[in-house]
Image (cartoon, helix red, strand yellow):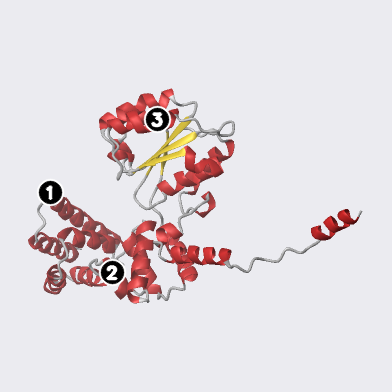
Amino acid sequence: MGAENAVDESMDVDILPSTSGYRNIKDKEKDKRSVHLPWIEKYRPQVFSDIVGNEDTISRLAVFSQHGNCPNIIITGPPGVGKTTTILCLAHVLLGPAFKESVLELNASNDRGIDVVRNKIKMFAQKRVNLPKGKHKIIILDEADSMTDGAQQALRRTMEIYSNTTRFALACNNSEKIIEPIQSRCAMLRYGKLTDAQVLAKILEICKKENVSYTDDGLEAIVFTAQGDMRQALNNLQSTHNGFGHVNSENVFKVCDEPHPLLIKEMLEFCTQGNISKAYGIIEHLWKMGYSAEDLISNIFRVCKNLPIEETLKLDFIKEIGITHLGMVDGINSLLQINSLLARLCQRALQS
C-alpha cells in the first residue's frame, strides 16, 4: 500500500516549464530568418483563401482539392498572378504531411530535356509512396512553355502510363507553346492580370504588418509600376522601404527607374495643345537620362490611356503610339522615331 501511495504522490508532482530557454531560442532564430526573407516568399499564400484575384478559377481548384481526384492541369497567365502559388496550395491541401515525399517540382532553372523526362520524371512516377485512397503524387512543371518539343513529346506517354498514381500540374506564360496532345490531356485554367485595387489592397496589408512609412502617391506609383504583377509590386515595395525607409513616388521611381509618368503626362498635355517644342524638350531630357525607346513608348501608352482628353482624340493618340511601337519592335528605335510620334500627336490634336 505504501508503495502505491508513493506512486500516486509521484504522479501528482507538477511539471514545471523548462528554464533552458531552448524553445525561445528556436523561435528567435525563426524570426531572424523571416526578417531576411524577401517579402514575396514571406507572404506567399499557403491556403486558397489567401490568394488574390482569379476567384472563379481558384474556387474550381478548391473543389478539386476537396474531392481528391484532381485531373492533370495547365495554369496559364502573365507573370506574378499566382500560378505557381496556386499549384503549391493545391498540393499542400491534397497531400498534407506527405507533401515533401510526394511532390516533384521542376522549373526552368532545372535541366528539363528529353533525358530528364525519361529518367527523373519517370523514376519519380514509379516511386512507391504510401498515400490515402484517392490521393496521387504530383509533378509540378513550372514555366513548362520553355520545355523543348522533344521533352514534351516524351511526356505524353508518361502522363498516360502513370495516370493511376501521378498527376501533372504545369504552369506557363504562353499556352500556345505547349503541344496540342498535352493540352488535350489536361484541364486548362487561364489566369488574368490582377486589378490595381487587388494589388493595392495586398500592399496596404503588408505595409501594416511591416510598419512601412508611406504616402498615397507612393502606393499609387507602386501599383503603376507593377501593372498587375503582384511579385513586381512586393519587390518594388521592399526595395523602396529598404533603400529609403519611406515609400513616396519619388523614391519608388528612383528604385524602379522608369520614365516618370508625371513628365510623360506633361509632355502629352503639350501635344494636345500643339506645342511640339516644349513636348520635345521633355522627351529629349528623358532620352539623355538614358531611357530606351521601348521604356518611353510603353510608359507613353500607359499614361495616355488615363489622360483626361476627348475620347476620339485619345483613340487617335493610341493609334499613333501603336504604329510607332510596331516600328520599334522591328528595330527602328531612334529618338527621331519618337519625335515623329510627337509631331503626329500635335497634328492630330490641331485637326480635332
Which amino acid type corresponds to the residue marked 1 in the rendered image? Asp
Q: Which residue position is annotated with label 2?
A: 255
Which amino acid type corresponds to the residue marked 3 in the rendered image? Met
Q: Which residue position is annotated with label 1?
A: 330
Q: CA distance from mark 2 to mark 3?
A: 45 Å
Q: CA distance from mark 1 to mark 2?
A: 29 Å
Which amino acid type corresponds to the residue marked 2 in the rendered image? Val
Check whether the beta carbons of the residues at disc 1 and disc 3 lie within 8 A of each other.
no
Mark whose residue sits in front, 1 or 3: 3
Check whether the beta carbons of the residues at disc 1 and disc 2 lie within 8 A of each other.
no
The x and y percentages for residue 104 are 42, 39
Check whether the beta carbons of the residues at disc 2 and disc 3 lie within 8 A of each other.
no
The x and y percentages for residue 308 are 31, 67
Mark whose residue sits in front, 2 or 3: 3
Mark whose residue sits in front, 1 or 2: 2
Instruction: Provide the secondary structure element on which disc 2 rests.
Output: helix
Residue at 13 percent of width and 73 percent of height: 281
| Residue 82 left/right relative to 253 | right
Q: Which residue position is annotated with label 3?
A: 123
What is the quadrant of the C terminus in the image?
bottom left
Residue closer to the observer: 165 or 64: 165
The x and y percentages for residue 215 are 40, 76
The x and y percentages for residue 195 are 41, 57
| Residue 60 left/right relative to 311 | right
Q: Quadrant of residue 348?
A: bottom left
Instruction: Provide the secondary structure element on which disc 3 rests.
Output: helix
Q: Is residue 190 visible?
A: yes
Residue at 25 percent of width and 59 percent of height: 301
For label 3, the crowd category at 10 Å Cα-Cα, with few meaning under 14, some 14 to 19 and many 20 or more, is few
For label 1, the crowd category at 10 Å Cα-Cα, with few meaning under 14, some 14 to 19 and many 20 or more, is few
